[in-house]
Image: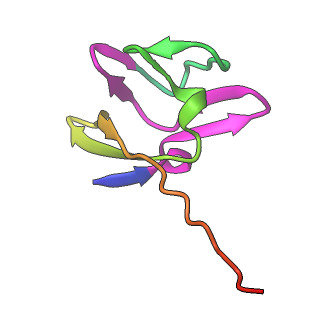
């Protein structure tokens, strides 16, 4: 299933906290774990992906991140 960053994590200031148990690669952490920007889990610095969507599968109550979708930027050109 596709989830936004905000559906998976809470951000307060620069502190990121998962809303549920999450696994990225071989690293699993729960809602009691908070971390700041620059911290990597499974080789992923989550603070770089706050505007992205994630491919997530639920396995025994754990949200397993399978991938991160790229953001496509739409440019609007106005004719003069």
The quarter in which the C terminus is drawn is bottom right
Residue 2 in percent (x, y) is at 33, 54
The quarter in which the N terminus is drawn is bottom left
Viewer-nearest residue: 32 or 51: 51
Residue 27 forms part of the magenta stretch: yes
**Residue at position x 62%, y 15% in the image:** 38
Q: How many numbered circles are shown?
A: 0
Viewer-nearest residue: 21 or 35: 35
Q: Residue furthest front?
A: 80
The stretch of residues the image draws in magenta is 4-28
In the picture, measured across the screen, residue 51 lies left or right of residue 15, that is left
Residue 46 in percent (x, y) is at 53, 27
Residue 66 in percent (x, y) is at 26, 35
Residue 48 occupies which quadrant of the picture?
Answer: top right
The structure's colour scheme is rainbow
Viewer-nearest residue: 32 or 26: 26
Height in image: 26 above or below 21?
above
Residue 5 in percent (x, y) is at 51, 45
Q: Residue furthest left?
A: 59
**Residue at position x 33%, y 25% in the image:** 23
Height in image: 14 above or below 8?
above
Residue 14 forms part of the magenta stretch: yes
**Residue at position x 70%, y 25% in the image:** 15
Residue 50 occupies which quadrant of the picture?
Answer: top right
């Amino acid at each position: 299933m596709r989830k936004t960053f905000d559906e998976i994590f809470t951000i307060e200031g620069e502190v990121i906290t998962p809303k549920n148990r999450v696994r990225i690669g071989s690293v699993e952490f729960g809602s009691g774990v908070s971390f700041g920007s620059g911290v990597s889990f499974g080789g992923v610095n989550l603070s770089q992906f706050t505007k992205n969507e994630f491919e997530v599968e639920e396995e025994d109550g754990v949200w397993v991140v399978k991938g991160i979708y790229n953001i496509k930027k739409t440019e609007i050109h106005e004719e003069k």
